[in-house]
Amino acid sequence: MLYGMIPERDAWAAALRERAEPGPTGEFVRFVRHLGRLSSPRPSAKWRRTCVALADAAAARDTVAACLRALVEGEPQCSREDGAHAAWIDGHHFHYHYLVHQDHGDLARGVVWAAALTGGPATLPLLGGLALRAGTRAGDLYEDFKLAGAAINALGAAEDTAALESLSRLQTKIRNRALRKQLDIALRTAAERQGITPAQLVERSVPSHGLRPDGSLERTLGAHTVRLAVEDAATVRLTFTGADGKASRTAPAAVKDGFADELKALKALAKEVRATLAGERARIESLMSDDRAWPYGEWREHYRDHPITGVLVRGLIWEFQDGNGAWHAAMTPPDGNPARVRLWHPIRATTEGVRAWRERIVDGQVRQPFKQAFREIYLLTPAEQETGTYSNRFAAHIVRYRRLYALFKERGWQANFLGRFEGGYNGEARAVFGGDGGEWRACFYHDPADDADWAPEYAATDQVRFERKEGRGWADAPLADVPPVVFSEAMRDVDLFVGVTSIAADADWADRGEDRFAAYWRETTFGALTANAEIRRAALERVLPRTKVADRCRIDGRYLAVRGELRTYKIHLGSANILMEPDDSYLCIVQARGRSKGTLYLPFEDERLSLILSKAFLLAADHKITDRTILHQIKRGA
């Protein structure tokens, strides 16, 4: 009666097969057939009522719960052993893994909804896990966007704060455009049920994970006290303290042997807290393009006093509005009860005010969660006022395409993938700015720069344009109409894309001879500084005097000049590449793999700034260099 409906081998359907093998009851047959008829992403109210009634009649609540758990935690299907997930693919020639065969997709999605409708709060973590597993690429496990969408929609239908927390976490991890739309719809629907905006819903749903107001919790495991603490904007740490008062970051043998399950649970909790911390860091930075202001009490409850969000808040500059409507910048609330609070942005501040905040941040050795005091500002140029509707500020750069595409996804931009296939000849990356409504969209154009058979190795950058939302669509907008903070934040992202992925930053490129892109490399690698590099210079002006090489270094225009014992060097503040005086010969020093864990204070995280300083320290003591490749270059023209 169920022949062909239940998969014969799929691990996720094992619980269904167990119920069907002895000879299924009529109630169970009707239940499975009902699940298999679900073809829409969100079932109707009638389908849901019938599903619950049939599940109870067949006593199948535990069955669908087991199937959902298997979809999240079980072994995936293998194309070589189980065949491809679709008939048109040669799974034996093309090896990969997948969760559900195409023929059983409706049944699997029906199972997901049945588990959500009948399982209660216990299914919510599994739904979040399935959305993440099916909605993101992990190794050779293929995404199943329809299955992920079912999990997302089921979470959106659940009237539980834990479901909202899961949806909020998924927003920071899922990049697929269709799934992100479903996430937005789910959050918007949930917000409407509560009479608040989606942004308010997200910030009120940030999990605290049981942490105390100071961002920590403690557990006693035998003779040891284990402390989990959010130490700063990037660090969540477990510390083990014995009866003698000695603390260790490594679990003692007594804890490992005697409390293995408890230790595993604490490590899992630390991982969840790290994920929440990273998500909140990205979310709060995204607010830099929004002019949103909070009532003071609301901000205090959901930002300052939150055990995780509060750690980030305390490292940022805020503006507090007094009773007369004036705004005052501070890192801590003033006395009394301000009317409203908003996130400080340097584009709204005076030059003197920005300079004062940078001095204060450096003097206090504050490491901000993201660039704020030292944030780049991008204003309309005369050339952009002339072109009117587009900017060529970041056009005509040669970039490493795969690195660029990965950075698009990391920063939340949606882009088609370039290649020799339909829709792959012209690239357009888009991102929405402007808060809850998302009234503005930036578009960054790019094209293949080589003749690769499949995906290009290099791309050439082109225009940046802006669009304004009109109803359900978008219309081109003059650059002058774009709010300054939106324009600045969008252009900052594009500057980041170009600066990180441009071949001009490749120290090895000079050894390629007359490569087709050599002229671009020579012109750009030591060219005029972008806003990003100007900020780097501003930070160096404040940090360098505090270093042991201060007397050997000076800022010279677009370079950091370093006086060594053998030669004087000029490190470009944009590319970090090096010229040697007196003939401006090129010095190639390739960055070592892995990031340095040095103790030098920097006001913000910037890998290129760290690289420039590490090269400065090396070259200031060039007589101590032992690397023969570097020494040969230095002594060749000395």
Image (tube, helix red, strand yellow):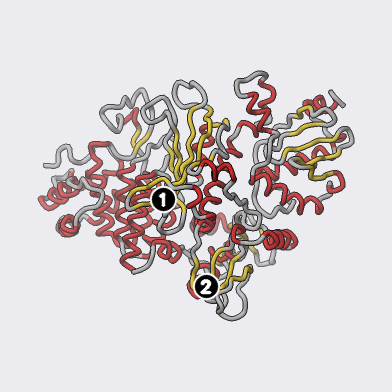
| Residue 219 on image: x %, y % | 55, 66
- The residue positioned 36% from the left and 28% from the top of the image is 422
| Residue 326 on image: x %, y % | 58, 73
- The residue positioned 43% from the left and 27% from the top of the image is 419
Left or right side of 155 for 575: right
Q: Please state, as top left, top right, bottom left or bottom right, where the C terminus lies in the image.
A: top right
Query: Looking at the image, is 263 positioned above or below residue 514?
Result: below
Left or right side of 111 for 527: right
Left or right side of 97 for 457: right
Earlier-in-chain disc, 1 versus 2: 2
Q: Distance between the residues labelled 1 and 2?
A: 28 Å
Q: Name the residue under label 1.
A: 468
Q: Name the residue under label 2.
A: 340
Asked if disc 1 and disc 2 are in contact, CB closer than 8 Å, the reply is no
- The residue positioned 84% from the left and 23% from the top of the image is 636
Return the residue nearer the eye: 397 or 225: 397
Viewer-nearest of labels 1 and 2?
Answer: 1
Return the residue nearer the eye: 541 or 379: 379
| Residue 477 on image: x %, y % | 44, 47
Mark 1 crowdedness (10 Å alpha carbons): few <14, some 14-19, many ≥20 = some
Give the residue at the far bottom of this rendering.
336
Q: Can residue 254 be seen in this snapshot?
A: no
Q: Residue 432's mark?
A: none
Q: Please state, as top left, top right, bottom left or bottom right, where the N terminus lies in the image.
A: top left
- The residue positioned 60% from the left and 54% from the top of the image is 370
Query: Looking at the image, is 157 positioned above or below residue 563?
Result: below
| Amino acid found under the numbered disc labelled 1 | Arg
The number of numbered discs placed on residues in the rendered structure image is 2
